[in-house]
Image (cartoon, rainbow, N blue to C red):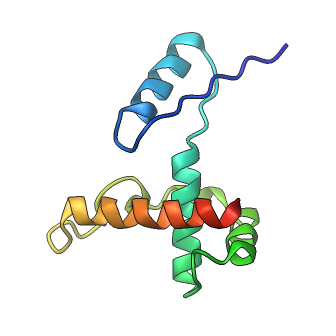
Amino acid sequence: MTLVIAIDGPAAAGKGTLARRLAARLGLPHLDTGLLYRAVGRRVLDRGADPRDAAVAAAEARALTPADLDRPDLRGPAADAAEIDREAALDAAEDHAVDTAAGLE
């Protein structure tokens, strides 16, 4: 039997922190679905497409590479933090992730 633990909750509630700590404690792999949604949303936006377009979002999800998940703008402020307010950057990424997730339903 495979053990799968899903953690759900509102944005910025600490789900990711809890998931990473739990995975480390139990010796389990960790899948950050929020990071996946943000990466898909970023690919869609980089393409100049509408994140609400389900077909485009699905195609970009299938095209994800490990390099897409290593982008610094997916995990916090953009590389040039002096020019971009951290909260605004995170809010924008979250908005794109929500739009992308809605397009995949």
Q: Where's the C terminus, which quadrant?
A: bottom right
Compared with 7, 102 (above or below) is below
Which residue is at the front of the view, 59 or 75?
A: 59
Residue 100 in picture, x, y percent from top left: 58, 65
Residue 52 in picture, x, y percent from top left: 60, 75
**Which of the 4 image quarters holds residue 95?**
bottom left
Q: Tell me if 19 is positioned left or right of 28 in this view.
A: left
Q: Where's the N terminus, which quadrant?
A: top right
Q: Tell me if 44 is positioned left or right of 72 in this view.
A: right
Which residue is at the front of the view, 94 or 26?
A: 94
Compared with 101, 31 (above or below) is above
Direction right: furthest residue: 1
**Which of the 4 image quarters holds residue 68?**
bottom right
Which residue is at the front of the view, 47 or 102?
A: 102
Count of number-bearing discs? 0
Direction bottom: furthest residue: 48
Which residue is at the front of the view, 31 or 80?
A: 31
At 59% from the left edge and 53% from the top edge, which residue is drawn? 36
Residue 44 in picture, x, y percent from top left: 59, 76
At 40% from the left edge and 30% from the top edge, which residue is drawn? 17
At 61% from the left edge and 28% from the top edge, which residue is drawn? 6
Compared with 54, 38 (above or below) is above
At 41% from the left edge and 59% from the top edge, which residue is drawn? 94
